[in-house]
Structure formats: C-alpha cells, structure tokens
Image: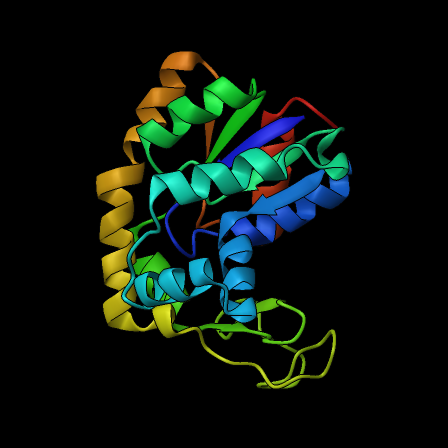
C-alpha cells in the first residue's frame, strides 16, 4: 500500500498517518520530520530549512524531492509507505510519479478557521517528537509529554501569523493536487472536522481495506 495524505497544516495528517502506519504495517514518511531532523543536527540543509520554516515558508522542490527519493529506497518501505507532507505541489507530484506508482491519495479537508485554531493550540515534544493539541488531543498532564515526560513546546511556525501564511500557501500551491489526483482516479476526501476515530475509520473504508 503506497499512500499520500493531503491536507492543510493541522488538518490531522500526522495523527492519521500514525494510525494507518500501525494498521497496515507500512512506513511513515514525513518530510516535515525529515527536515526537523536536519535542523536538529544543524546541517547546512537544516540551517537553510530552519529560517524558511520559521517564516511559514516551504523548502525548495529540489531538496525535498532528493530526500524523498532516497527515503523510499530504504528497507522499511518494501511493504509500502504513507507520504505525509509530500508532494506539496503538482511539480512534486509529477516527480513522484516518476519514482513510484501510488495506490491512493487521501485528502483530509477542513475549514481554514478550524485549522488555524488547531495550529495555535498544538504542542510538540522536543525529545520524542510526539504531538498534542490543547483543544482535542491534550496530554494527560498539562505541558508534559505522556510518552517520555519531557516538557512540551510550541513550534515557532505554530503562531497565528505563521499559521495564516502556511494555510494560504497550502491553498495556492497544494490545492491543485486535489484536481491532479482526482483526474488520475485515485483521490478520495474525508471530513477533517470529524472525530479522530471517525476519520481513521473513513480512511480505512475508503481504501477498501479492513
């Protein structure tokens, strides 16, 4: 099973990807996580990406495509994978077509105001990478990671200003992907405002798998 998840920032792609990875026993490829790893390592790519992401921008196609091309060659992708955060543009989608044949593309759709509210309530664990949301997926103890006990932080690109910029960028660059994959006959849409469990169920049913 080779899947792509499409959705604006805070639509719920990461949450659903984690569940689908467990359900199908396939790899989760998050370009955001890959980039943040580069930032943490303070590589040249990481330094370049950090400045762009903090301003709510997107890293260049060339860098992302090269990263994904190498990632899908790894052993854990042999049974399939879920791409979360890639492709973001039609150009990237066309490049991905040259690398692999996708089974399905899932579009998690939600109104802008819902996604902005979620973005500004999101918290991340700097130690293990777990994500939470003060509105609908809070930690058991406020400000503390359930998994490792570290103090949660808010990403610099989860402010209102950066959130609005990221959502606007999604509409401009990524919404054309919906039409691109609809024409290919492999896209289906789920309601991103539904309960987390209901979204997972809708995706699995849409994939035609139990």
Q: Nearer the viewer, residue 193 or 164?
A: 164
Residue 171 position within the rendered picture, expressed as x and y whole percent measured from the top left: 25, 43
Look at the image and tell me whether residue 187 can be seen. Answer: no
Residue 167 position within the rendered picture, expressed as x and y whole percent measured from the top left: 28, 53
Q: Is residue 153 above or below residue 197?
A: below
Q: Residue at x 53, y 38 (%)?
A: 68
Q: Quadrant of residue 209?
A: top right
Look at the image and tell me whether residue 207 can be seen. Answer: yes
Q: Quadrant of residue 113?
A: bottom left
Which part of the image, by quadrant, shows the N terminus?
top right
Q: Nearer the viewer, residue 79 or 25?
A: 79
| Residue farthest along the top direction in this orientation | 184
Q: Nearer the viewer, residue 140 or 3?
A: 3
Q: Is residue 54 above or below residue 201?
A: below
Which part of the image, by quadrant, shows the C terminus?
top right
Q: Quadrant of residue 121?
A: bottom left
Q: Residue at x 45, y 77 (%)?
A: 154
Residue 208 position within the rendered picture, expressed as x and y whole percent measured from the top left: 66, 21
In this rendering, would 97 be left or right of 53?
Answer: right
In this rendering, would 60 be left or right of 82?
Answer: left
Numbered label tally: 0
Residue 63 position within the rendered picture, expressed as x and y whole percent measured from the top left: 42, 44
Q: Residue at x 66, y 84 (%)?
A: 150
In this rendering, would 65 be left or right of 160?
Answer: right
């Amino acid at each position: 099973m080779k899947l792509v998840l499409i959705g604006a920032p805070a639509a719920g792609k990461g949450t659903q990807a984690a569940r689908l990875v467990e359900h199908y026993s396939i790899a989760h490829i998050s370009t955001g996580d890959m980039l943040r790893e580069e930032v943490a390592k303070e590589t040249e790519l990481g330094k370049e990406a950090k400045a762009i992401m903090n301003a709510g921008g997107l890293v260049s196609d060339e860098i992302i495509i090269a990263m994904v091309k190498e990632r899908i060659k790894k052993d854990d992708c042999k049974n399939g994978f879920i791409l979360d955060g890639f492709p973001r543009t039609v150009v990237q989608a066309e490049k991905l077509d040259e690398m692999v044949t996708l089974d399905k593309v899932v579009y998690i759709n939600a109104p802008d105001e819902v996604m902005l509210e979620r973005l500004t309530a999101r918290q991340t664990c700097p130690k293990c990478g777990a994500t939470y949301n003060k509105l609908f997926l809070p930690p058991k103890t406020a400000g503390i990671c359930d998994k490792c006990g570290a103090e949660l932080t808010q990403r610099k690109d989860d402010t209102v200003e950066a959130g609005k910029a990221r959502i606007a960028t999604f509409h401009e660059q990524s919404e054309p992907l919906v039409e691109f994959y609809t024409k290919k006959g492999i896209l289906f849409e789920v309601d991103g405002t539904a309960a987390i469990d209901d979204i997972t169920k809708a995706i699995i049913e849409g994939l035609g798998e139990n």
